[in-house]
Image (tube, coloured by chain):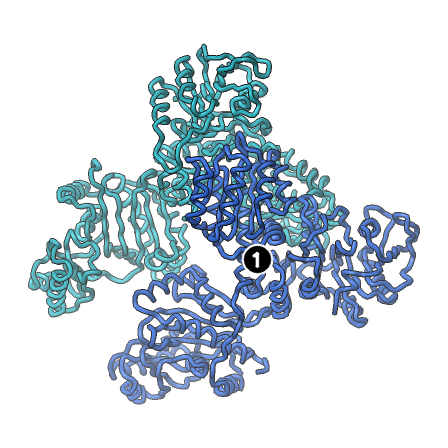
Chain colours: A cyan, B blue
Amino acid sequence: MKLDALLSPESVAVLGASPEPGDLGHRVAHNLCAGGFGGEIVLVHPQGGQLDGRPVATELGQAVDLAVVATPAREVQAAVEAALGAGAQAIQVATPLERRVGSEKGELERELLAACKARGVRLLGPSSLGVVNRAHGLNATFVEHLPPVGSIAVVSQSSALAAAILDWTASRGVGISKLIALGNKLDVDEIDVFEHLLGDPTTRVVIGYLEYIRAGRDFLKVAEALSSVKPVILLKTGSTGAGARASAAHLGEPPAAEMAYGAAFKRSGVVRAESFQMLLDSARALVSQPLPRGPRMAVVTNAGGPGIMAADALEQHGMQLAALGQGTLAALRKLLPPEAGVENPVDVLGDADPARFAEAVRSVQADPGVDGIVLVLAPQASTRPVETARALVACLDHSKPALAAFMGGGGVVEARQALVAAGVPDFPAPHRAARSLGALCEYATWRRRPPRVVTRYPVNRRRVERILRRVEREGRTDVEEFMAKEVLAAYDFSIPQGQLVTTADEAVEAAERLGYPVVLKIVSPDIVQKSAVGGVRLGLVNPEQVSDGFDLIMLRIQKQRPDALIEGLVVEKMCPRGLEVVVGMTRDPEFGPLLMFGLGGIAIEVLEDVAFYLAPITEDEALQMLKSTRSFQTIEARKARVGMDVAAIASALQRLSQLATDFPQVREVEVSPFIVGRPGQESIVADARLVIAKGVAP
Amino acid sequence: MKLDALLSPESVAVLGASPEPGDLGHRVAHNLCAGGFGGEIVLVHPQGGQLDGRPVATELGQAVDLAVVATPAREVQAAVEAALGAGAQAIQVATPLERRVGSEKGELERELLAACKARGVRLLGPSSLGVVNRAHGLNATFVEHLPPVGSIAVVSQSSALAAAILDWTASRGVGISKLIALGNKLDVDEIDVFEHLLGDPTTRVVIGYLEYIRAGRDFLKVAEALSSVKPVILLKTGSTGAGARASAAHLGEPPAAEMAYGAAFKRSGVVRAESFQMLLDSARALVSQPLPRGPRMAVVTNAGGPGIMAADALEQHGMQLAALGQGTLAALRKLLPPEAGVENPVDVLGDADPARFAEAVRSVQADPGVDGIVLVLAPQASTRPVETARALVACLDHSKPALAAFMGGGGVVEARQALVAAGVPDFPAPHRAARSLGALCEYATWRRRPPRVVTRYPVNRRRVERILRRVEREGRTDVEEFMAKEVLAAYDFSIPQGQLVTTADEAVEAAERLGYPVVLKIVSPDIVQKSAVGGVRLGLVNPEQVSDGFDLIMLRIQKQRPDALIEGLVVEKMCPRGLEVVVGMTRDPEFGPLLMFGLGGIAIEVLEDVAFYLAPITEDEALQMLKSTRSFQTIEARKARVGMDVAAIASALQRLSQLATDFPQVREVEVSPFIVGRPGQESIVADARLVIAKGVAP
């Protein structure tokens, strides 16, 4: 359902329009009246009277598009019912409703939601700061001083943060188009708002603050659609253990897995802000600057030290210092005094006048090897900040992003204002300009991504259905290695040749047929951790060892797990040596199947050097996953030295993705290790486990 | 030599006191006259005349404590000579001297330095912004508007950055005691200034910006002495590859190794700022707040989301969310509405009045399990920021650090001013308050460090002298494995039992004596990379394999390196299995011997998970080195599982430290791998190499 009644109402009622100037309802009513809203305004309060020269009715006696409920908490239910009764199309509850932190959704909230749903009315809040729509002259919040009209839309779950953003942007002259504070998200949530902003011509950049996301798959769709037309920057808190615990306490339930949020934002092109400051910095850069064509950045500075700071920060945020072309270097040498630095960072020296600084920027800007520019100025004896700012503004052609860091305080205030007024975002320190350029780069890279084509592999789906049915019949959820490998084999994974045996003689016979060395492993639905109970023997090289191994396993298992159902032992050909990696899949409650890749051993267990990506995955994305791990260097090095079938890992991830999509009841798969062969060789599942969920329809 | 004449002169001359108001010399002269300086002022310019109502002499005709040279560049040499001739005690050259970037110290600079040295006169600059000494009423810079009088001293190599810091602090009301801009550091450098600040009662915190440090060992001493009495925060640029290259281009020579700076700052208690902003934020926290007793921090907030942001940031910066005591929780439950969050972060809710907020802070402050507090406020409907700020100021007892993050813009300006005026630093976002609290924690931890007692191990120093003399006589620098192990054995390292042999029969005999399996390795001063030329055979288990191995090595070496001098082969008992780590030492040109530790394999090569520490090292520091690597978890896990002699690694590092201190000609040692045994077992040097420098006196 559209949000037009909420965001662009023709008529607005404020319920709780109290005569007390300090009351929430009074302030909302006052701001609505004073904000230039062109539609009809209806003020309601039991005491009646007047407010800002307008009559206050004692009851809501007419239908309105939007009813804002700003009464005391105990009157909220009656007010919502009155609004519904009078035929309101949308309701915003500004009042915070009492709900013990950590408790379930309150009974009152459930009743409000049901009443609104029954009439097809959208509900924003409770605890919503409200809505601002600059193009519509609408300010239905208690915040009196709004930022100027601009192109940034703000979506915030926290009303406090929404108010802080309004205050911050107002004081810095950063313009906004709309603000929607979601509050408790009983009904209207970020998905509704993103859908609306998709077609909102007044919004060019969307920024948001979210504490959690439900309906993850819907979020993905709408966020990807929105990012495809305008940048979306989100601050999502709770990223550390402490933050997540605090967030869970605040919300009353555990949030979705952090890595799932990371993967969801990556997939849908959302730029993730690490802090409040980065959220606003990135927005200022993205709303004013063209997207860079690549990561090669130039720094032009009038001071060596701050130039180095900018270079440091560019590299830290994944960009490169551009190598300037010969023509550019020649032009700079001609332009600058001999002691100046013409190599990037270009140091125009402390005595640079505005013309010299601007001329250097002009040369750098024209260099086809430069994708973006950071302009650094630190005030020195002969520096003329304001004139320099004006000269820079005049020479920038907006073909590439240019961000400024004019350092200092009062001495550069006027210069900074001149830059900002001309659409050149300025930051108080070089690292913030560089980080904001990084946000531009990240978004530009996502926009340039290749089309997503998910490969469908020919697989034996029937066979997996049969196996899973059998497992489900037996009431199990942990599927042990032998069966897990059968499932993977049906999805075209190579598994070691092997045979299920029940006697020592059969084991020897199988080993003779397979060829030594072989491995013996217990097969029991009750034993998933086989090594821990003595259920595995590796590297057996002759009949005697196989026979001994069989007896030893049986002996130990019967001692340690006398209760376990033993199906037999599997005799497997020992896997060849090769690089051991781990590929897997888990299912996030909100975002669905999450593929996982890491180099085996220390990289995963200790260093948490693991890449996650949401299924379904394309070949390109699978390769990106590999490349995004730090240990990819090891893989590259090994590939160069002995050859390695890196594509086999990408293919394995794609086939796991397909398995996850085909079988929603598969909750977890872990192939650990997956032994990657040389090109032309097979890559092999050396061990695997699979977890299925009960009661999920296939 | 003391800096009194420079920093607290009784008389100051400005050479180049031009009548042109825009000229550097004019501005310096004007600021000196207008700044409240109580001593004698002498203005000099060839044109004479008047400036600010004072006479301008055409020549310097009298001795002064400090002569500031602010003439055009071509007149600098004459001005310095005139100052020296007239008997100046200290000279500051404000004028930037032309020096092609990347070139050697200019001839002019060398002459100036020599002339000053000959007369025992200290020289600041050239390119020095100059000196500010608030207690002395001295402003010998071109910056007109100074920050208020305070307790922060500023040392900056870059004059541009010094000016930016003055401008920034002035605009935010942050007070400074002194500022010294070092410029090109011909003579006076950070070491001189730190020595001065050590006994400066007007300075309580030192902040600095440095691009490089020479005389690293002297720096260490003075920085450690200074940090022991007041916090020192440094911004050192060039930390990334790009930054280092830019810095090298700017300075004309490669900087000392980045890891050496890291180790030097850690050793000497210097808090390292990652950015300009963090430098100033940390200074504001350290100058106003008591040091925390530990890392357990509390957040008190009036808004859930921003509270979570603070929790996230505290954990990211190495602190913990304090678990509040039962008494505190009970008090908070009584105080706060039922829907408030009493667990840390404490959420006093959006409708909190100043009294409720302050009372909650009072409870948290009294909790002995809380080491510091972050106060977060986001403006909401009924929030009264100014009154809240005043209530908080009144309830804080300064027993623990308390930092505020009042979010927003104009709406919280007055509140923020009230906090800052009362000595509670306020930051525009929670993560900056948390990061600043992290700086307090880091410094407090260093201040609490145990006394540094370096253990001297009983070693066979004579034996090493003999070996090194022999190597030096032979004119070699790379010492191969056999000899390197002899050196290490003399420093009480266990090396595998082995024997040098020259025939296959001798090899077999030695193997029989040592016991199988054995290893064969070529011994040749010309072959350091033995494996690459087929000079190593591992895991030989019988006489035949040893004999074959001997012949194969000889055959291959003679083919591949017919020129090499072969001393024979060593037969070594094969090392037992165990955890493989790498310990080593390199010598930094500025900071001296740098010890190194990492887990073998991927951790070092790919993930650069390596710890560095400057020698000499204590046992405690060696253990800290181990703990500071991410892979220490692997070591801990293995220790828990199979037992491991972790102390052996710490001891190895200490003995390498002793070797480095005893033998300055040892330039590099690498023990790779060092096989760490279980407790009670030996830990063994499986392979080692050593590099010695030519012509270093032992």
Q: Quadrant of the C terminus of chain A?
A: top left
Looking at the picture, tell me which residue is in the foreground, A153 or B500: A153
B146 vs B698: above or below: above
State left or right for residue B300 relative to residue A698: right
The kind of residue tagged 1 is Arg
Q: Which residue occupies the foreground of this view, A656 or B569?
A: A656
Q: Position of residue A579 (x, y in %)?
A: 31, 59
Give left or right: position of B419 versus A604: right
In the rendered image, which residue does mark 1 sit on?
B272
Q: In percent of the image, x 25 and y 84: which residue is there?
A: B543
Q: Eyeballing the image, is B120 above or below B433?
A: below
* Image quadrant assignment for residue B5: bottom right
Is B325 in front, or is B135?
B325
Which quarter of the rendered picture does the N terminus of chain A lie within? top left
Image coordinates of residue A15 in percent, x first then y, are: 48, 18
Q: Locate residue A562: give its quadrant.
A: bottom left
User: Does residue A208 appear anywhere in the picture?
Assistant: yes
Residue A555's spot in the image, x, y percent? Answer: 11, 64
Q: Secondary structure at mark 1?
A: strand
Q: Residues within 10 Å of mark 1 (few under 14, many from 20)?
A: many
Q: How many marks on residues?
A: 1
Q: The residue marked by circle 1 belongs to what chain? A: B
- Taking depth in this image into account, of B127 and A412 the one nearest to the observer is A412
